[in-house]
Image: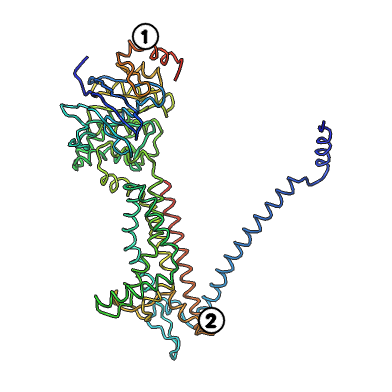
Amino acid sequence: MNTPVKEDRTAGDRLTRYPKHIREDWFGRVYVYLCVALMVVTIFSIVWFIASKGLNPFVSGAIGIPDLLLGHVWKPEGEPPLFGALPFLAGSASVSFIAAAIAAPFGFCAAVFMTQIAPKLGRTVLQPAIELLAGIPSVVYGFVGLSVIVPFLRDNFPGQGFGILAGAIVLSIMILPTVTSIATDALSTLPAGLREGSFALGATRWQTIYRLILPTTLPSLLTGIVLGISRAFGEALAVQMVIGNAPHVPRSLLESAATLTSIITLEMGNTVGGSLHNNVLWSLALILLLMTFLFVFIVRMLERRAKR
Amino acid sequence: MGEKAFFTKDLSVYYGEKQAIKKISMDFPSREVIALIGPSGCGKSTFLRSLNRMNDVIPGARVEGQIWIDGRDINDPATDVVLLRQKIGMVWQKPNPFHKSIYENIAFGPRYHGIRDKKKLDEIVESSLRKTALWDEVKDRLHRSALALSGGQQQRLCIARSVAVQPSILLMDEPASALDPVSTAKVEELIAELKREYCIVIVTHNMYQAARVSDKTAFFLMGDLVEYDTTQKIFTNPSHRSTDDYISGRFG
């Protein structure tokens, strides 16, 4: 008979002020809150750090915000130094949007194929292949772009091969996994009855796909594209290797250009911390950060629409 | 009994090696409701799905035998599935309205079949909704999302959607089993109303429902058609022991 012993112990536990389960609960709670607090502090300090550095040139009155955003000329060593970031804004925007425009149709088609047409082949071959694409380091993409795409463009089009188009092609392959996997998720979570409902009305598979499935999943597909653009906007290394890095607003897709990210990586090492040039680079970083916020905001809006 | 809407001859369905439906021959008179009853897994839903070739989309499913409608065997590979499905509408257990407006849900099928004229579509939408007694409930919000309707309304919308392509046969796979009693009653009323124009084949697990709505009843067991007769006869004086057992709830 061990019942009395058991009773003794629970009685003893009841007498302690903090029995074991209360202490465990408390410990777990503290641990979770600490982690969250640390994360929030980290995020906010990064934002604060970038903002304080990036706003410095404007606060100190060295240059105005319009000078940076609308200026055409980037001459940090000039007399007086000119910091016009319009070429980089234009470069970043054009490579990202063109990359998304190239990747979107491929991504959709791959997703439609994997979910609607050949689910088995899609799951066993295509999906792993596309996931693999996501795991390739960006320097490898840049290298491939440099040794395949740039020479190809040089041989077939006017110009040196380096430029917006080369950057956009490399980026489109890099963001393909993002676009595809989000589109695949959206398509595979469609209620099963929808397809059958459409078939039963006499629709063919293609009619069902483009008249019913694509419109129904459109908000999610757009989410994928925006995330893709966001990734393309932030990519530095691969773009820098193929874009040519010429700080002027490009007039054609085959001309050399530069992006916000590529100019930061190129010039960061050549500047002294605290100098105007260095701080203006932080301003560019701030612009990148704000763009990211914007993309996150758009994605949120789209998700809310998708839920309805 | 009126003319035949369609009939099957030695219809078998296989899922891989397993024979789900065993050589079933059945006549379906037009303008009557035929209930298919039987325990779960007896093949009645499979049978229903094969009638408008919905089994085509299931990997590994194979159909043998014939289904004759209007002097054509629909299992003939030359049959245009699109036209066939226009003739045979289908409604599922779970309402599956498209993520579109009420209007677009109804206009969807007619558009597939080439009707572009706005006025004509308006007419079709109104008459389909009237036929399903939904018009008065939704006429003020035709362009709102169909997903905002109640479950029962959604199901009637799905029936209206099938009706909109002017079929002659309606297949219903447990159309009321996901609905509350009031909505169920409405769907049953609707079935009674629709049978003036269509041949309706309904799969149901609810004996009372089969007795209430159908003119003829078929009892399926393990892929076999055990008994097929007037609902009256099946429910009062079945010729087979197993039919009697099932109806009186001794198994299944």
Residue occupied by mark 1: B236
- Chain under numbered label 1: B
Q: Secondary structure at mark 2?
A: loop
Distance CA(mark 1)–CA(mark 2) = 96 Å
Checking the image for residue A305, the label placed there is none
Q: Taking A26 as reference, is A290 above or below it?
A: below
Q: Taking A89 as reference, is A292 above or below it?
A: above
Q: Residue A250, percent across and down?
A: 32, 77
Q: Residue B2, percent across and down?
A: 20, 16
Q: Residue A300, percent across and down?
A: 45, 55
User: Hey, what amino acid is under mark 2?
Assistant: Ser
Answer yes or no: do the residues labelled 1 and 2 have beta carbons within 8 Å?
A: no
Q: Taking B129 as reference, is B115 above or below it?
A: below
Residue occupied by mark 2: A60
User: Hey, what amino acid is under mark 1?
Assistant: Thr
- Check chain identity for marks 1 and 2: say if they share one: no
Q: Residue at x 40, y 17 (%)?
A: B208
Towards the viewer: A85 or A33: A33
Which residue in the rendered view is the most extreme toward the left? B71
Task: Tell me where residue A254 sits by quadrant.
Answer: bottom left
Towards the viewer: B180 or B237: B237
Task: Tell me where residue A130 sits by quadrant.
Answer: bottom left
Q: Taking A120 as reference, is A243 above or below it?
A: below
Instruction: Please state, as top left, top right, bottom left or bottom right, where the N terminus of chain A lies in the image.
Output: top right
Q: What's the colour scheme?
A: rainbow
